[in-house]
Amino acid sequence: MRERRAAQEARRAREFEAFVAGAGGRLLHAATLLTAEAPADNPRARRMLTLALAHTYACWDRLHGEDPYSRAREYLATRFAHGAWHRYAALPLGRPLPAVGPLARLTPQERLVLVLRLYEGVADEQVSALLGLPVERIRTVCDRATATLLHPPRGPAPAVRRAKAAAS
């Protein structure tokens, strides 16, 4: 009995290690995009990934054919959404935390929808169900986030110098 249990635990550990080896990098990249941290300096993304993988490992035997990547991605997204809501609600005037990644100009909700829709390829309906928002709202948020990235705001116009010759 003990040997059988040990063999099952060893098999479970091997399966999970193979899953992490295959999916860990992509999940970390998604978490880094969500947190808008620099890829080389992403402690919040790494913490979110660690929690998502721990949750997935805890549920491993109960997956019964369910995609473990989907489960880890779902946990990552809901963890980010919950954490972002609390973190940004507590800041004065709703100012976001400093961010430096490519999606730093977006709000947390825009980043979440954009990453799930465009980077992960999750359908509007699935994102809607995951976040508890209407499908039209998901489409609107995704469109707005895409427009913000494709058409960044312009900086101030350069000062115009008057020619000294005209003054003479």
Image (cartoon, grey):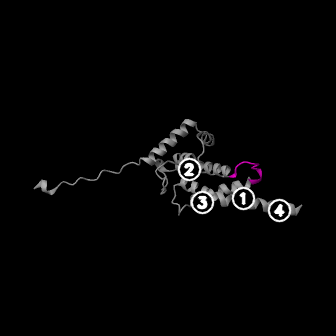
Reading the image, the residue beneath label 4 is 7
**Cα distance, mark 1 to mark 3?**
18 Å
Reading the image, the residue beneath label 3 is 46
Query: Which amino acid type is marked by label 1?
Result: Phe
Farthest right residue in view: 1
Which mark sits nearer the N-terminus, 2 or 1? 1
Which mark sits nearer the N-terminus, 4 or 3? 4
Label 1 or label 3, whichever lies nearer to me, is 1
Which mark sits nearer the N-terminus, 1 or 3? 1
Farthest left residue in view: 168
Which mark sits nearer the N-terminus, 2 or 3? 3
- Answer with the quarter of the image where residue 133 lies: top right
Does the magenta-highlighted stretch encompass residue 32?
no
Label 4 or label 3, whichever lies nearer to me, is 4
- Answer with the quarter of the image where residue 8 lies: bottom right
Q: Do the residues bearing badges 1 and 4 touch, measured as CB atoms within 8 Å?
A: no
Residue 161 drawn at (x, y percent)? 21, 55
Does the magenta-highlighted stretch encompass residue 64?
yes
Residue 145 drawn at (x, y percent)? 48, 45
Label 1 SS: helix
Q: Which residues are magenta?
A: 60-68
**Cα distance, mark 4 to mark 3?**
30 Å
Query: Which amino acid type is marked by label 2?
Result: Tyr
Label 4 SS: helix
Reading the image, the residue beneath label 2 is 119
Reading the image, the residue beneath label 1 is 16
Which residue appears at 66% of the width and 49% of the height?
A: 70
**Cα distance, mark 1 to mark 4?**
14 Å
**Cα distance, mark 4 to mark 2?**
37 Å
